[in-house]
Image (cartoon, rainbow, N blue to C red):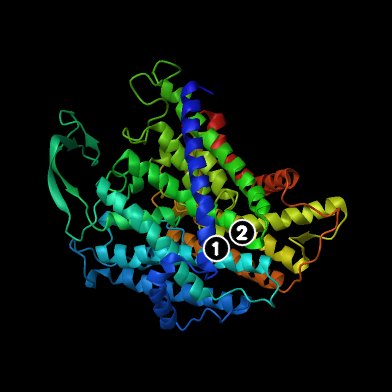
Amino acid sequence: MSAIAGSEFLQAGVLVALVVACALPLSGYLVDVMEGRPLLIRRALGPLERSACRLVGAREDDGMDWRRFLASVLAFTAVSFIGLFILLICQGALPWNPEGFPGLALDTAFNMTASFVTNTNWQPIAGETNLSYFSQAVGLAVQNFLSPAVGIAVAFALLRGLASSDGGKLGNFFVDVVRAVLYVLLPLSLVLALVGVWQGSPQTFQGYETVQLLEPVSVDAEGTLVDADDPTAVQEVTEAVVPLGPQSSQVAIKQLGTNGGGFNGANSASALENPTPLTNLLQCAAMPLIPFALVFAFGRMVGDRRQSRALMTVVLALLAAGLFSVIVAETAATPQLSADGAVYLGALDQSAGNMEGKECRIGVGESAAWTALTSATSNGSANASIEAMTPIGTLVPLALIGLGEVVGGGVGTGLVGLLGFTVLAVFVASLMIGRSPEYLGKKLGPAEMRMAVVIVVAPALAILLAASVLVMSPASAAAVGTPAPFGFTELLYAATSAGGNNGSGLSGLSSNTPLINVVLGVEMLFARLAPLAAALVLAGNLAQRKVQATGAVGLSTSGALFAVLLLVIIVLIGALSLLPAFALGPLAEQFMGAF
């Protein structure tokens, strides 16, 4: 590893350490909020909480079993889906549309609705050229709050099932959603949005502005930007349109809620969404903040913080491997980029490594760290083009997404996925020592094991099925931007991103086609709802189990040995599920020397 890579990795490590330090106190706040304990902020926002709960007919003392909780999740998702779908197809007739954008096509609207309702935030179109301010602020931004709130509600239902034995009550879904939005997501987003406005991110409902370029450019016959004196130039461009709108508020919740969908097509590579080094740092830190806090909240809920420390050790080990691999790959670049040493890629007077597809103001190290964090946390936002990364730089995000939502993961769903793997690890370890499986003093039977398998396997199954449909369809061949292994990687990455609740994509894929929109839309709904349903069934079963004293020879799930076992199981299941597909894409590209 070069000195440059070592320095960038150290910076990323300091960032992660700071996020962990912030996540610890936030976890206590999360537990107090979701359990309805007295807090100073509740004196100010308590009337709003009670009014919102009365509006939806929810009461804190009306505890739900897993069936009612699941029915509420599905009904809430269905209402959100219908409302957002109608809004998107009718945006041309709705207010706050200074650019006069028409309603979206049905397949595009279906894909985007499924995407934002499921917290995936995959976008087949660029927001600034297709969506009105009303669609952005009232449609997408609202779902950016509601979809992570659903994840938090389900995560706490599972934690209550693990921690209690009161006959199966998991709390009230609607009360949990109100509390998650009102006390957690809104205050944190407000702070981050104000910082964004301070640093220069737009927050307005004025129309787009046309500005004069300081240096004119030209376009060739294919519409590609070239120098003004280029012989292929056919038209000089002296003006540019600057998209405005309520951007800062949406950027804040897209990062904190692990949504990732950008107001602009360039996402956080845009100077409008991410204008300064400070905003880049804070947005990068915001992605893993709540997922990490939920892992620590698990230990607080079950009364044993050693349990959350064991899980966090696994999360940080996988994240460190991802950060290390991407940073090393991008700072070293490839022999093709260096022209076998003829092109200087060092750090003297420039950013070292592979600068293709990266913002000069951000650089390689910060882009590599962002890419690892956004794929680990199922965020999906981007401050650089993943398409232009090295083969290893593309493989690592694929692998982090494909492992399941375990390396932080999405808000709420990440903890659900991690606990699903934990239950499987407990089963395997119990077989090794010849004891019946139990976790936190509760016996695990066949029903619990089946639900854990669904939590772990459903996203991988959705990914492989969707990728198979896309690869076998002739229509997909016209959508890929590059032939051979990289064309396969573009389709595989799209399917993996949709099934892994991520939403990032490779820019070479023309994804706004009826086939891709429908396939990925169905995939996102299945990969989101199936694990959540299994988690609630698991929570309901565990809530009915009495806690039993663990003997002296019982299995410890808080030690280093169990953490290593859990790490191995996560890697093995991920490798067995997706490694053959990876071998046909980024691995084949790496070994062939293609770039």
In the drawing, what numbered circle is on residue 31?
1
Q: Position of residue 188 (x, y in %)?
A: 40, 57
**The N terminus appears in which quarter of the rendering?**
top right
Category of crowding for the residue at label 2, using alpha-carbon neighbours closer than 10 angstroms: few (below 14), some (14–19), many (at least 20): some
455 sits to left or right of 286: right
Q: Is residue 479 above or below residue 190?
A: above
Image label count: 2
The percent position of residue 119, horizontal first and vertical second, equals 46, 61
**Is residue 449 left or right of 158 when viewed as pictured?**
right
Percent x, y for residue 20?
52, 46
Type of amino acid at the residue the image marks with label 2:
Arg
Helix, strand, or loop for circle 2?
Answer: helix
The vertical placement of 241 against 32, above or below, is above
Question: Residue shown at 31%/34% (left/top)?
Answer: 361
Residue 8, given in percent of the width and then of the height, sits at 46, 30
Amino acid identity at mark 1: Val
Q: Residue at x 59, y 43 (%)?
A: 316
Numbered mark located on residue 190 in the image = none
Circle 2 sits on which residue? 300
Q: Secondary structure at mark 1?
A: helix
The reply to whether discs 2 and 1 touch (Cβ–Cβ < 8 Å) is yes
Neighbours of disc 1 within 10 Å: few (<14), some (14-19), many (20+): some
